[in-house]
Image (cartoon, rainbow, N blue to C red):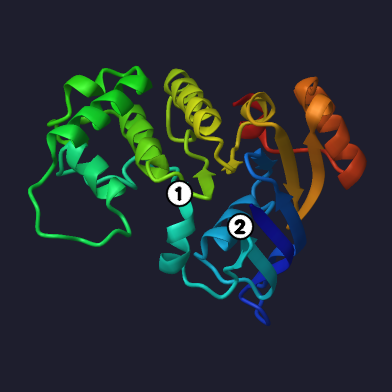
């Protein structure tokens, strides 16, 4: 579903601020893979996600989504294949619109717009069922403005909107980093539920080692623009934070120094 072939990305080339963010990275995700990506600050994990999304075009290499070469496609055209949830809960929803209106916008994204009445009775019923699945009581507040919701409620709604049309690839950009631990755990629970229910191929960037280990069927660790660990199957099921740190030190020759990832 996602095939990344030897991509590289350097920012500010030829200047004193030159930074190689991705260094000949290759990665293949099968249909239904739920891959978590962990790494220290500047490891390249966010650049990898942004390269897939088309936020930045890569300098070299190729990116394929479901067999389609999207390497040169701009971000807005690539969006047809992707669902994305950002770190900031305020991004991804329209604060001044109702919950049901936000869902209607997400459902009609990319479709031909016709002159018609707003939201139908059938659509309201569908939205109510979807919101009930979140377990946050939003199904009884469908006419409430999204700006009145808490950060966790908005992030859960954004997740629902991003997956409403069953994207070929779901990108989660540290989508629980701005939430308190209890709310983050709830949003991750909802994430797992939706991803498994719809068999969505998912790439989740996280700053939290425990979350990276606990979720998904595969874990990737990045360092200095490279993928240095790729753990899956039975090995991932029995993985601990200590195991991950030991493997990082063995492969990279250095100690992992990101406290927020360790303590999160």
Give the mark nearer the N terminus: 2 vs 1: 2
User: Height in image: 157 above or below 180?
Assistant: below
Q: Disc 2 to disc 1, how far (Cα)?
A: 14 Å
For the residue pair 34 and 262, the one nearer the viewer reads as: 34
Question: What's the residue at 69%, 46% (across, down)?
Answer: 30
The tag on residue 261 is none
Question: What's the residue at 51%, 43% (across, down)?
Answer: 172
Crowd around label 1: few <14 · some 14–19 · many ≥20 (10 Å): many
Q: Does 239 sit left or right of 153 as displayed?
A: right
Crowd around label 2: few <14 · some 14–19 · many ≥20 (10 Å): some
Question: What's the residue at 15%, 44% (across, down)?
Answer: 96
**Residue 137 in sight:** yes
Quarter holding residue 19 = bottom right
Determine which residue is flagged by label 1.
83
Quarter holding residue 34 = top right
User: Height in image: 88 above or below 78?
Assistant: above
Quarter holding residue 115 = bottom left
User: Height in image: 180 above or below 257?
Assistant: above
Residue located farthest toward the bottom when viewing the structure as drawn? 14
Q: Does 139 sit left or right of 85 as displayed?
A: left
Identify the image quadrant of the C terminus.
top right
Mark 2 or 1: the one toward you = 2
Residue located farthest toward the front when viewing the structure as drawn? 122
Q: Check contact, mark 2 vs mark 1: CB within 8 A.
A: no
Q: Secondary structure at mark 1?
A: strand
Residue 258, image x, y percentages: 68, 38
Q: Does 215 sit left or right of 253 as displayed?
A: left
Question: What's the residue at 15%, 38% (across, down)?
Answer: 98
For the residue pair 99 and 117, the one nearer the viewer reads as: 117
Residue 85, image x, y percentages: 44, 44
Determine which residue is flagged by label 2.
66
**Residue 253 in sight:** no
């Amino acid at each position: 579903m996602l095939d990344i072939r030897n991509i590289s990305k350097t920012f500010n080339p030829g200047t004193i601020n030159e930074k190689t963010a991705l260094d000949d990275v290759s990665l293949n995700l099968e249909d239904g893979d739920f891959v978590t990506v962990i790494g220290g600050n500047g490891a390249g994990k966010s650049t990898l996600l942004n390269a897939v999304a088309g936020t930045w075009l890569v300098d070299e290499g190729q990116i394929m989504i479901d067999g389609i070469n999207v390497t040169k496609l701009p971000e807005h055209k690539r969006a047809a294949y992707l669902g994305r949830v950002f770190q900031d809960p305020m991004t991804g929803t329209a604060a001044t619109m109702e919950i049901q209106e936000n869902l209607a916008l997400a459902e009609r994204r990319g479709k031909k717009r016709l002159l018609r009445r707003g939201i139908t009775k059938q659509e309201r019923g569908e939205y109510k069922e979807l919101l009930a699945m979140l377990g946050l009581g939003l199904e009884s507040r469908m006419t409430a403005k999204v700006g009145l919701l808490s950060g966790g409620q908005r992030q859960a709604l954004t997740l629902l909107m991003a997956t409403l049309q069953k994207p070929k690839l779901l990108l989660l950009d540290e989508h629980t980093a701005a939430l308190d631990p209890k709310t983050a755990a709830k949003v991750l629970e909802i994430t797992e539920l939706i991803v498994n229910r719809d068999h969505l191929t998912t790439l989740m960037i996280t700053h939290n080692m425990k979350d990276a280990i606990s979720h998904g069927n595969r874990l990737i660790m990045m360092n200095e623009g490279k993928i240095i660990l790729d753990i899956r199957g039975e090995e991932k099921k029995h993985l601990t934070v200590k195991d991950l740190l030991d493997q990082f030190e063995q492969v990279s020759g250095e100690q992992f120094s990101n406290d927020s990832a360790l303590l999160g």
